[in-house]
Amino acid sequence: MAKQDNNFNQLFSSLKKKEYKPIYLLMGEEPYYIDLLSNYMQENILSEMEQEFNLTVLYGKDVDMPTVINAAKRFPMMAPYQLIIVKEAQHIKNYELLLHYLQNIQSSTILVFCYKYGTIDKRLKIVGEIDKVGVVFTSNALRDYQVTPWIKDYVRTKNLSIDEKAAALLAEFLGTDLGRIVSEVDKLIITKPANSNVITDELIEKNIGISKDYNNFELQNALLTKNEVKAQKIVFYFDKNPKNNPLVVTISVLFGFYVNLLQYHYTDNKNPASVASELGINPFFVKDYETASKNYSASKCMQNISLIREFDAKAKGVKSRASNGELLKELVFKLMH
């Protein structure tokens, strides 16, 4: 898993051991980990009875920093801690006002800032000061190539496994939104046959609506093997189902494929692990690039990259009035010839 997962696991482990800090700054582009941590704190640090007087949930749109600080200075009532969770903390300004509070910090207060969809500049003094007495956790968004391994790891935590193709399908369809990924995977876990411990592409097609035969993953596979009949069948399906198969996404996938393939041609070490690291892909798919390299030379890859750029412009209405289906059909033909 990504490095931040290790940081998350360490932090989550300390919370489960009831090893608390007086202040937490949870920030980053990916809200999934921020929500997991803050929800666990809200549900577990205080007992149900203690929460009645000692749990305060504030929202950044409704409060300012002086209000938060004044609340943090209060003492708990009949409990070892008071817990203050500031949600939507990205809307609060003047974080430097916390500097004075940190010099006289209230040790019986656990103050949690949930700063989503961005970060406070780590070069600022306030971030370093928070880190000295508390925790600064950054939840980075996953890169595209990290999603498939993340899905496999998540499924493994449920004592299940997932087919490589099935994981790739989910990654392509769901993108990098971990909250959405978890929601859909949990749905699959609930609906899987009781006698099976594997999530398959058939299960995904049945419960999420992603076609196991007609998707960008299969289109890429048809291109790399130069299976023109299969490619045109997929193009026809895409044309009939444009809502689930937007051209802009397909073009992006094809562009990434040929850029990676060009890089594969110029990679000296063709060892699968080395290629996977160089291209930022799952080692399982290295064999696809090996196959594709025999069907597309480096010069053809460069031609195809230019073609994809041209058709991307056409799809946006530049010197073209063709439908998306017509454009994709022409593009796929030219990519293969």
Image: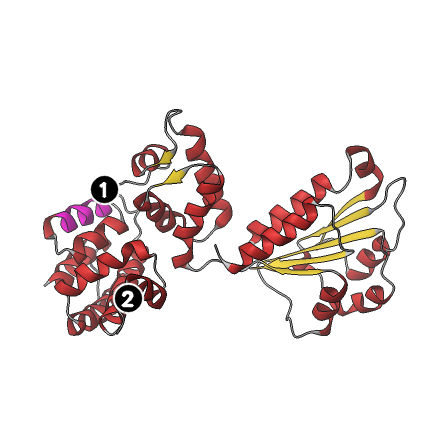
Identify the residue at horizontal 87%, vertical 55% (top origin): 73
Residue 82 in magenta? Answer: no
Residue at the spot of label 2 = 260
- Neighbours of disc 1 within 10 Å: few (<14), some (14-19), many (20+): some
Q: Is residue 172 above or below residue 198?
A: below
**Residue stretch in magenta:** 230-240
* Closer-to-camera residue (318/215): 215
Tell me the SS state at disc 1.
loop
Residue 195 visible, this orientation: yes
Label 2 vs 1, first from the N-terminus: 1
Identify the residue at horizontal 84%, vertical 64% (top origin): 101
Tag 1: amino acid = Asp
Tag 2: amino acid = Asn
Q: Which quadrant, please, contains the C terminus?
A: bottom left
Q: Position of residue 238 (x, y in %)?
A: 24, 47
Instruction: Report whether 124 appears left or right of 269.
Output: right
Please give the label number shown on residue 213: 1
Q: Position of residue 24 (x, y in %)?
A: 71, 57
Identify the residue at horizontal 77%, vertical 59% (top origin): 64
